[in-house]
Amino acid sequence: MKYPTFWKNVSGRRKRIYLALFIFVIAIIATVAGFFVPPSLKDAQIIEQQLNQTITQSQASGTLALRIFVNNFRLCLLMFIPLVGAGFGLVVLFSTGQAFRAALMVQSSSALNTATTANFTITTVILTLVLIGATFLCEYISYSIGISESLWLFRRLLQRRWREAKVTAILIGIVALLLTVGAIVETLALSLV
């Protein structure tokens, strides 16, 4: 197999970073693709209802941050599975795009049916957007690490390089930290909305 020159001439660490950045872009593309495949209005309402129910119940019991973390960490751990995790991760990201679309569809259809408008201050809007952006970065960086390590781990296992397990453990720790921060920030953002 012939590799491009820039790939041959860089260190292993840079190769990991390049792969993670490439996967980050692919993750965004997968989510956007999912957004452009709209579910039916009935399916969108079911998805929206389940999301709202989960959020409401978790906020009431004070476990929203924990629930978000456990859900995201579980999904991300599955993304670390050699080769299979990469495909799983792309399906999850595609489904995330569809969930965004479902929420948007339901919100826009209910906005057309009701004349109520929410009163937000500019500070609240800016803070919410910053928190959503921070959540996005924490989650998508984590997913990119998981998917790229899935590919990297597959290659290293074929080469019988067992030391990769140590790197994988370190990356899982980094992902856990990022997703913890993301869950806390997402909980804060949801409390503002």
Image: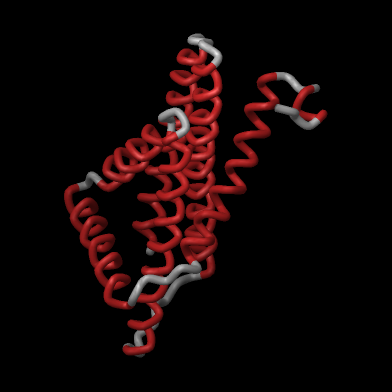
Lateral position of residue 134 relative to residue 118, left or right: right
Q: Nearer the viewer, residue 50 or 16?
A: 16
Lateral position of residue 36 relative to residue 72, left or right: right
Residue at 35%, 85% (x, y): give it: 116
Residue at 49%, 52% (x, y): give it: 131
Specify the quadrant that holds the N terminus.
top right
> Could you say where residue 6 lies in the image, as x and y percent from the top left?
80, 30
| Image: 171 above or below 123 | above
- Give the image quarter of residue 55: bottom left
| Image: 128 above or below 185 | below
- Give the image quarter of residue 82: top left
> Could you say where residue 179 lies in the image, as x and y percent from the top left?
42, 37
Residue at 50%, 56% (x, y): give it: 31
| Image: 177 above or below 61 | above
Specify the quadrant that holds the C terminus.
bottom left
Residue at 60%, 35% (x, y): give it: 20
> Could you say where residue 67 lies in the image, as x and y percent from the top left?
27, 44
> Could you say where residue 134 lies in the image, as x and y percent from the top left?
52, 48
Lateral position of residue 136 relative to residue 118, left or right: right
Q: How are the residues colored?
A: secondary structure
Lateral position of residue 151 relative to residue 54, left or right: right
